[in-house]
Amino acid sequence: MKTTKILTILVLMFGLVGSASAALVAHYQFEGNANDSTVNGLDGILLGGAGIIIDAERGNVLSLATDGDYVDCGYDTLFDITDSITVAAWIKVDLFNRSYQAVVTKGNYTWKLTRSAQTNSMAFFCNFMGVGDMSASGTMNVNDGQWHHVAGVYDGSKIDLYVDGVLDKSQLAWGIINTDTSR
């Protein structure tokens, strides 16, 4: 049985290019539910067999044990991040079983933190208006049953992927990230 556990997912939205302030869009701590702990109230709904379990090392975690388990956080426009963005999560993968298996995503045509194709590593994709997908596809193995902190960052000039605080891949990138009504 495949089990993917995610401890904390947080999405940071940075202000418009040139702005020095950043705003936390959502933070999911999985304290018995998929509620957002920010003032934005972007609560998620556990679907399929998704559940909150206790992990000996991390406490409350989201468990996605089978295909079709996920958290639906809706399609609030706060997730329509078009400029700088950071998406981060603690993950524990016991077994990847699908190409581009999602960790955190705003649909297929905006931004997503996923498994990199059919590898044991992660990737961060941004789909840019008029340009298409650009990504940083890493090489560090996260398919090992251990906890890893993964983060995807787009700063307006490049896409970076970090694993456990170490830069795994950096790729030049540019443009405005697409928006859509995908979840």
Image: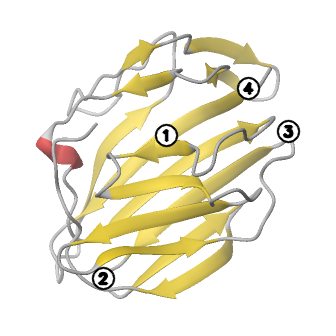
Q: Which residue is mark 2?
A: 156
Secondary element at image label 1: strand
Mark 4 crowd level (few <14, some 14–19, many ≥20, 10 Å Cα): some
Location of the C terminus by quadrant is top left
Mark 4 element type: loop
The residue labelled by disc 1 is 9
Alpha carbons under labels 2 and 4: distance apart: 34 Å
Report which residue position mark 3 lands on: 145
Depth check, mark 3 against mark 4: the one in front is: 4
Q: Residue at x 80, y 47 (%)?
A: 143
Coordinates of residue 84 in the picture (x, y in percent): 29, 71
Give the CA distance from mark 1 to mark 4: 17 Å
Task: Residue type at mark 4: give it.
Answer: Thr
Tell me: 79 left or right of 145.
left
Q: Please, is residue 183 above or below residue 149 in the view?
A: above
**Residue situated in front as seen by the camera: 57 or 120:** 120
- Residue at numbered disc 4: 3
Q: Position of residue 111 (x, y in %)?
A: 35, 58
Q: Which mark is residue 66?
A: none
Q: Residues under labels 3 and 2: Cα distance? A: 33 Å
Whichever of labels 2 and 4 marks the residue nearer the N terminus, that label is: 4
Q: Disc 2 on helix, strand or loop?
A: loop
Residue type for callout 2: Gly
- Disc 2 versus disc 4: nearer the observer: 4
- Picture coordinates of residue 162, whole percent (x, y): 62, 67
Give the mark, 1 or 2, whose residue is nearer the N terminus: 1
Give the residue drawn at x 73%, y 26%. 3
Q: CA distance from mark 1 to mark 3?
A: 18 Å
